[in-house]
């Protein structure tokens, strides 16, 4: 499979105490293992099973994901800005592949 590149949308600068929106998408087939090819062969299961986000080492979002989630899983959530630092995003699939991306956040007083 080609290298998948997660995308993240969030502000780079926010005010202290501000609640800001984070949006993420991971291009991934999320194959359930129930479908078959035109030749009747079963397509092997391949899904993202976990997604977490840490803000300055504190867990701020987590999801256990199952086969009922559509391809290209999209998540949207809100975080309250406390101090400048980094948000670290981590996706893991059922084949052991992991994607990590970090985004810097600058919190203005």
Image (cartoon, rainbow, N blue to C red):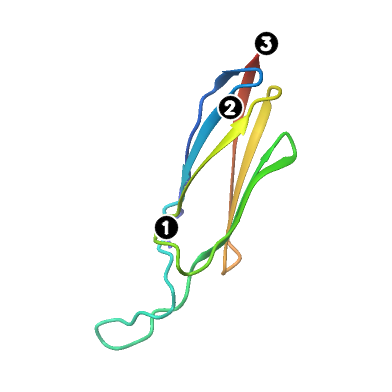
Tell me the element at label 3.
Answer: loop
Q: From the top left corner, tell me how far across and down residue 83 is, in percent.
A: 71, 22
Residue at the (43%, 63%) spot, across then down: 1
Q: CA distance from mark 2 to mark 3?
A: 14 Å
- Which callout, 1 or 3, points at the residue further toward the start of the chain? 1
Farthest residue, direction right: 57
In the depicted structure, whether residue 80 falls above or below residue 64: above
Decide which of tag 2 and tag 1 comes sooner along the chain.
1
Q: Is residue 35 left or right of residue 33?
A: left
- Report crowding for label 3: few under 14, some 14 to 19, many 20 or more residues within 10 A (C-alpha): few
Q: Residue furthest bottom?
A: 40
Who comes first in sequence, dot 2 or dot 3? Answer: 2
Hey, which quadrant is residue 84 in on the image?
top right
The image position of residue 36, as x and y in percent, is: 33, 82
Rounded to the nearest whole Å, what is the CA distance between mark 2 and mark 1? Answer: 35 Å
Q: Secondary structure at mark 2?
A: strand
Q: Residue at x 34, y 87 (%)?
A: 41
Of 31 and 77, nearer the camera is 77
Pointer 3: what residue? 109
**Relative height, residue 101 to residue 13 (above, below):** below
- Structural distance between the alpha carbons of marks 1 and 3: 42 Å
* Count of numbered labels shown in the rendering: 3
Residue bearing the label numbered 1: 2
Report whether 27 appears left or right of 36: right
């Amino acid at each position: 499979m080609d290298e998948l590149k997660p995308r993240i949308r969030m502000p780079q600068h926010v005010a202290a105490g501000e609640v800001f929106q984070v949006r993420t998408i991971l291009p991934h087939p999320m194959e359930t293992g129930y479908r078959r090819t035109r030749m009747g062969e079963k397509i092997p299961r391949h899904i993202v099973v976990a997604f977490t986000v840490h803000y300055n080492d504190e867990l701020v979002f987590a999801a256990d994901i199952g086969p009922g989630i559509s391809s290209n899983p999209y998540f949207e959530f809100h975080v309250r800005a406390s101090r400048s630092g980094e948000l670290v995003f981590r996706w893991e699939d059922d084949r052991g592949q992991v994607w990590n991306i970090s985004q810097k956040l600058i919190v203005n007083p």
